[in-house]
Image (spheres, helix red, strand yellow):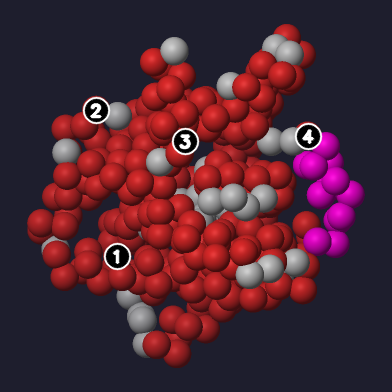
Amino acid sequence: MPLRRLLEWSARHGGALLAAGIFAGLLIPPLSAALRDVVTPTIAVLMTLVLLRVDPGQVLSYLRRPLLVAGMLAWVLLATPLLAFAFVRLAGLEGPLGAGLVIMATGCSATSSPAFARLVGLDGELSLVVSLISTLLVPFTAPPLALGLLGVDLALSVGGLMGRLVLVVGVPLVISVAIRRIVPRVTLDRWGPAVDGTVVLLVVLYGFGIMDGVLARLLASPGFVLGGLALAFGGAFALNAVTALAFLPAGKRVALSAGLLSGNRNMALYFAVLPATTDARILLFFSLCQFPLFLSPFLLRPIYRRLRLED
């Protein structure tokens, strides 16, 4: 079928499509403005498909390794913000960019992490476990860290976050379980590559929406935006590398998966909860953090492939 072949092609070229999509969202402002309000529904559908593609048995096996999961959560939510703050102080990065980098490091792992892990051949099941639990824990870890380190009140509401989680995790979980009960396993496996391609296209759609307004800021303040973009890439890839090194004793595949989780953070959550008085330059930096997130499968897949071959 033509549609199925198109979706399978999208899965094979997912990294390139994500890279092209984020730039299309930047360079076509009417498109990004039109799709701004579909971000949350897109994430819900995306999570449903991600849950269809992970192995439930493998997810449970990681839940039976609480020390590994707890260590990874402590590193992602507690250690990396302190490392980011130490870097900001040593580098003299006072101001909105330094604050943005530290707040970015307090964030939970991106919802798209399991999909990105699958795209680059890493552990989607481990990524799912850590991304979901870190999202549950971030209201308890991020506010005291941001207030204590920067004097910034993140005001993350546990009730509001739980309501969002019901929409983007709870409902997809119920739907995915129902689909698994109705559709034979062999059919799901046969359509797996097409499902992966659909995930890629949904992430591209999400990328369009979050680029709303970024081009105007680039044209108005090119120096700040380009500097923020360089810091976003440097911060994301540094967190990725340091985390991978920290978890290398757990095995190369686990370490690389942990690095990808640590480098890709969920900034959409902060867009939703930060007050209107938040410095607009910090919010702009969060938008710029989407570039390394979307480009990481394209840029890092050859590196991951080479490292695994050397294992």
Can residue 284 be seen at all in this image of the molecule?
Answer: yes
Residue found 47% across the figure and 60% down from its top:
302
Q: Quadrant of the C terminus?
A: bottom right
Q: Are marks 2 and 3 in contact (CB under 8 Å)?
A: no
In the image, 244 versus 103, the foreground residue is: 244
Task: Specify the amino acid type for callout 3.
Answer: Ala
Residue found 38% across the figure and 67% down from its top:
233
Q: Is residue 289 left or right of residue 58?
A: left
In the image, 136 versus 260, the foreground residue is: 260
Q: Are marks 2 and 1 in contact (CB under 8 Å)?
A: no
Q: Nearer the viewer, mark 4 or mark 2?
A: 4
Q: Residues within 10 Å of mark 1 (few under 14, many from 20)?
A: many
Q: Position of residue 115 (x, y in %)?
A: 55, 41
Q: Gap between marks 2 and 3, in whole Å?
A: 25 Å
Q: Which mark is residue 34?
A: 2
Residue found 25% across the figure and 47% down from its top:
23
Q: Quadrant of residue 125?
A: top right
Q: Identify the residue under disc 4.
A: 56
Q: Nearer the viewer, mark 4 or mark 3?
A: 3
Can residue 169 be seen at all in this image of the molecule?
Answer: no
Task: Specify the amino acid type for callout 4.
Answer: Pro
Q: Secondary structure at mark 4?
A: helix
Q: Identify the residue under disc 1.
A: 229
Q: Nearer the viewer, mark 4 or mark 1?
A: 4
Magenta span covers which residues? 57-68
Judged from this view, the residue extending furthest toward the front is: 309
Q: Identify the residue under disc 3.
A: 11
Q: Main secondary structure of the magenta part?
A: helix
Q: Gap between marks 4 and 3, in whole Å?
A: 22 Å
Residue found 43% across the figure and 22% down from its top:
5
Sequence-wise first label, 2 or 3: 3
